[in-house]
Image (cartoon, grey):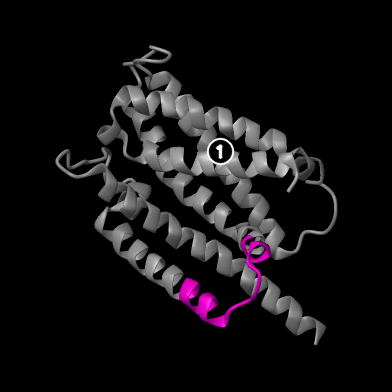
Amino acid sequence: MKPKQILKIITDISMTVLLLLLMAYSLIGEAAHEWLGVGIFLLFVLHHFLNLKWCRNLFRGKYPPIRVFGTALTLLVFLSMAGSAISGILLSRYVFRLDVHRFSAVIQTVHMLSAYWGFAFMSLHLGLHWSVMIGMARRLTKKPSKIRNWMLRSLAALIAAYGAYAFVERDFGNYMLLRYHFVFFDFEESLTLFLLDYVAIMGLFVCIGYYLTKRRFILQRKEKM
């Protein structure tokens, strides 16, 4: 594997870990949240620098529906990250120390919407590229195994099912639809349990994104028959 490819994987894994920790805002502390926010923004810039080839090819070639969806999703990820970064800087009390009071309610709303929609968009984006991870894993295994494949599919189904439960239980959809204007945390809850629920929610969106690409490949094979 080339060094650039290794750096891409490390960057993406690091962004995923930081994204999960950022969702635990009050459980990790406000100062830690701000510093992790700076970290994920820098990784986001690095991620785009490592994928400049994709940016250069943006206006080249045909745009079948799956590419339109993928490009639109990338734009939404960018907008949500920009919304999180700008609103986070304006609300900062430890890193940038701006803490704008006059429009704080509006800025907090933008920050919350950007965070929850961004989490969903980034997880879907990861799912669209999950086949690459599966291909890498297959190259590391010596022999194909139907039993292993079914076990992994069953595990993915369980994660997605629990993710759907956690999505409802954690009021994730209500935050996305702005039915609540503040995020409520149980400060007696274990950070580990909180993160496990959000890993499952991420897994749900990853599965949706991944099977959208699988559907594309199935349609392409049918057209060639």
Please tell me whether the stretch drawn in magenta is mainly helix, strand or loop: helix
Q: Give SS at disc 1.
A: helix
Residue beneath the point at 77% across and 59% down = 63
Along the line of sight, the residue nearer the viewer: 137 or 200:
137
Say whether residue 15 is left or right of residue 107. Answer: right
- Badge 1 is on which residue? 79
Q: Residue at x 43, y 62 (%)?
A: 204
Q: Residue furthest front?
A: 142
Residue at 25 percent of width and 58 percent of height = 169
Residue 210: percent from left, percent from top? 57, 64
Residue projecting furthest to the right: 61
**What stretch of residues is rendered in magenta?**
137-153
Q: Residues within 10 Å of mark 1 (few under 14, many from 20)?
A: some
Residue 4 lies, in percent from the top left, at: 73, 39
In the rendered structure, does residue 27 fall within the stretch colored magenta?
no
Quadrant of the rendering where the C terminus is positioned: bottom right
Judge from the rendering whether residue 139 lies leftward or rightward of residue 210; answer left or right. right
User: Which three-letter amino acid code belongs to the residue tagged 1?
Assistant: Leu
Decide: is 188 above or below 193. above
**Could one spot residue 221 in this view of the protein?**
yes
Q: Is residue 52 left or right of residue 193?
A: right
Q: Position of residue 55 (x, y in %)?
A: 76, 41
